[in-house]
């Protein structure tokens, strides 16, 4: 448990540093390093990763408002910075199994309005990975298109843009309508 909290604290600090760097004046040379900053975590027994630039925040043991009639992959809502954020079971989304409550963390993705939360089991670390060390992702699970690459440590890098565009992660626009499955 202590290692989880230390990893989460390190991840939060790195996200804050990254936000400060993004807010700073641009490098006059415009040269960007060929590395990716990745948040690694586990879900459904798999080691997964997302680029930190797509992570808004990480919620520890978030208190979730369960919405049992949602159906689909959505489990409920969490409060993130005063906004109700829909939360999906990432393991169910990737493996095609029914959603299961549990998990210890919600990774809130940035880049859409409203943001989307992914329920994960454990936050492992934030690391910098040279882009040229990534390998092609094998086609596995129910959603192989979401799997962009694999790190040398074996973490499957997910495509955040495809996750954010997935209709299974949206609340129904019509009251009483089921979520997309």
Image (cartoon, rainbow, N blue to C red):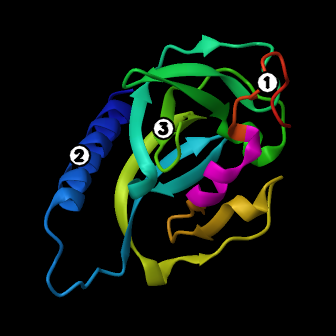
Query: Quick check: is 167 in the magenta stretch?
Result: yes
| Camera-side mark, 2 or 1 | 1
Residue on which disc 2 sits: 16
Residue 96: where, in percent of width, then height?
Answer: 84, 42
| Residue drawn at 49 percent across, 38 percent down | 107
Name which residue lies at 53% across and 36% down.
114
User: Above or below — where is 28 with respect to 92?
Assistant: below
Determine the secondary structure under disc 1.
Answer: loop
- Quarter holding residue 86: top right
From this view, report whether residue 30 is shown above or below residue 142: below
The structure residue drawn at horizontal position 32% and vertical position 44%, both measured from the top left corner, is 11
Indicate whether 99 appears above or below 65. Answer: below
Name the residue that disc number 3 marks: 108
Image spot of residue 29 (x, y percent): 17, 87
Name the residue located 78 percent from the left edge and 55 percent from the top edge: 143
Q: Which stretch did the figure color magenta?
A: 160-168
Depth check, mark 1 against mark 3: the one in front is: 1
Q: Is residue 27 above or below residue 169?
A: below
Q: Element under label 2? A: helix
Quadrant where the N terminus sits is: top left
Residue 176, position as x, y percentages in the image: 82, 16
Q: Which mark is residue 174?
A: 1
Left or right: 153, with 144 as reference point: left
Q: Which quarter of the figure is the C terminus placed in?
A: top right
Distance of label 1 from label 3 (alpha carbons): 24 Å
């Amino acid at each position: 448990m202590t290692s989880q909290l230390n990893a989460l604290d390190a991840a939060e600090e790195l996200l804050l540093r990254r936000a400060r760097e993004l807010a700073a004046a641009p490098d006059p040379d415009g040269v960007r390093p060929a590395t990716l900053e990745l948040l690694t975590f586990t879900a459904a027994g798999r080691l997964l990763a997302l680029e930190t630039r797509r992570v808004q925040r990480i919620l520890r043991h978030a208190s979730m408002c369960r919405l049992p009639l949602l159906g689909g992959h959505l489990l409920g809502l969490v409060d993130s910075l005063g906004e109700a954020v829909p939360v999906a079971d990432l393991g169910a989304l990737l493996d095609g199994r029914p959603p299961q409550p549990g998990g210890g963390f919600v990774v809130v993705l940035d880049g859409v309005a409203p943001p989307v939360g992914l329920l994960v089991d454990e936050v492992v670390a934030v690391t910098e990975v040279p882009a040229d060390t990534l390998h092609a992702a094998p086609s596995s699970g129910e959603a192989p298109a979401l799997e962009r690459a694999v790190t040398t440590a074996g973490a499957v890098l997910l495509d955040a843009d495809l996750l954010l565009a997935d209709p299974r992660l949206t609340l129904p626009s019509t009251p009483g309508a089921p979520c997309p499955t």
